[in-house]
Amino acid sequence: MQPRDLFLTASASLTRNKSRSALTILGIVIGIAAVILMLSIGQSAQGLILSQIADLGSDLVFVEPSAGDPTSGPPSPFIEQTLTMDDVDALRDSQLFTEVSATILNTLTVSRGEESKFAQVAGVDEGYLTVFPADVAIGRFIDQQDVDAYARVAVLGKGVAEDLFGDLDPIGRDIKIKNVNMRVIGVLEEQGSRFFQNLDDRIAIPVTTAQRDIFGVDYVSYISARAKGDIEFAKEEVRWILRDEHNIDNPTGELAKDDFAVSSQSDAVAIIGVVGSVLTILLSSVAAISLVVGGIGIMNIMLVSVTERTREIGLRKAVGATEKEISRQFLLEAIVLTMVGGIIGVVLGVLAALGAAAVVSQSVDGWSAVVPPEAIGLGVAVATAIGLVFGYYPARRAARLDPIEALRYE
Amino acid sequence: MALIELANVHKRYENDGVVTPALNGVTLNIEEGEFVALMGPSGSGKSTLMHIMGFLDHITEGTYLFRGRDVSRLGKDDLARMRRGDVGFVFQAFHLLPKSTVRDNVTLPMLYAGVRNGERRERADRALAAVGLTHRAEHLSNQLSGGERQRVAIARAIVNDPKVLFADEPTGNLDTKSGTAVLNLLQELHEQGRTIIMVTHELEAAEHAERIIRIRDGQVITDAKNHSRRRGEYHK
């Protein structure tokens, strides 16, 4: 049979039974659409995080406390807070950095008169704005004098300012953080979310005040610094300085022995890449399962169709169809079904991805729809392959029918 | 050289180790242009004989020469190819594709026989004209009466201009009037020079043929010219 005739025969059989064909491909349509949607959301999220990391700048070194040997069991949720202002001073003294900044973070009740709310309180110094760049809308930001003087001053994020003060000008007025009166000296411009934290709900106060008067501790949550020269060299220097400060005997420089971790933008990018590929593998397995289920549906319906059309198969054989021609016809029917299902699935998936991005971008700044072009081709190709795999067995069954038996089939 | 030469043909079916004989040494010749009726009760082997002559089944023993060519040992694919041009079938249950048009049904064998696209329509219409159904070409086959359906099946069987036309109980599902029309049509095709082999258990249908072969228990018991041919009369 000519390929063209084969194709026309297969499509004629499918259009003869439109509603069944439509139901048959539903599994594939949903499977492929879900794959496209998930891939798109995954890539959008990854793209957003990567762009925010890129905003940090490639010279930023980030120091956090760390729970020691990462290979000895799962990391403890109770990480010992090992970083102090002495570490900050030691790094400043090293002359390796243009900027060293310490931050301590906690969520506390903040109130003004009757108004109160939970807000993230960040004990910072003037270097804070180099890590989370923001313009000061009114007033000024915390400076070194505030830090040195344990000043009871606060700079509000735009969201907190609106919640506590409404239309009032907050400058010069007091708020209460954990019963300590703090005077508002500035309000930041809207910053949006970063790494899924709403920076507009943050209150910045001098790190010294935060440690002594608010939290009653002497550690800092993390230290950030901007390297003057080679970033890898700077990271290694930070490690040696802090080992010295923390009296860690670690002559071979094993990271597992340290009670802190040093990372940079490129480390974060690498981690996001790993997280991204793990996520992709996870989503792909879920998608693969759903597509296998869809494929089994196709096989099931094709088997029913072969049984129903036993007499047709017998007739085709009687007029000279070979086994190969019969199996090709049924295989092609399965492939046409799944390919059409794949195309519809891709279209629906892309529409769903655009819709999802439109919704998400209203609450997450910088979120944009990413539809990976290779996913479109892949979606159709995978769907077609499913038709090939799951259509094979029914097609063989059809081809092997004995023509005499098939013609007698009631 | 006869069109069909069967010599000592045996056919046995084997199912789960149980051997059922269907044909026990059939020897017969059929010449080109004959109209032969194969008669016998059910289970006699007449259908098996037709299936073998029509390349739908293999023989277990003996030889089958078709136009002098030994086809006894052909494989499945070769038999399928033989069915494309050399034989045409008409079945008791018509076996039309229900949601396809009459013309598409008649076109079907040409798809497998490799007839060029441009030629198909003309040949289908010629076959439909031969069975008097030109006006039904665009109808769906399930909109037709039983008699019309069988005539479409005949048109389908002759569209590739086969050497022999096999009719398996062609009147079995038809009333008297439609059955008469189908038998007359077969006679007409025979008079145009076609070879027709009809399997039937109805004597009145068989009497339309010019030669009647009776089969019982897988053997030919009589094989004689039919001197009292019926024309245009057939009662159930």
Image (cartoon, grey):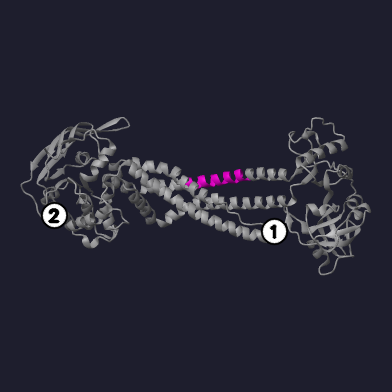
| Of B106 and A203, the residue lying toward us | A203
Span of residues in magenta: A279-296
| Of A271 and A325, the residue lying toward us | A271
| Residue at numbered disc 2 | B184
Q: Position of residue A196 (x, y in %)?
A: 72, 53
**Around disc 1, counting alpha carbons within 10 Å, would you say few (fewer than 14), some (14 to 19), or many (20 or more)?**
some
Residue drawn at x 29%, y 58% as measured from the top left: B101
Look at label 1 and name its amino acid. Answer: Asp
Task: Specify the principal SS of the magenta part.
Answer: helix
Q: Chain of mark 1?
A: A
Residue drawn at x 66%, y 50% as measured from the top left: A46
Q: Chain of mark 2?
A: B
Q: Position of residue B206 (x, y in %)?
A: 13, 47
Query: B52 above or below B102?
Result: above
**Around disc 2, counting alpha carbons within 10 Å, would you say few (fewer than 14), some (14 to 19), or many (20 or more)?**
some
Q: Which mark is residue A365?
A: 1
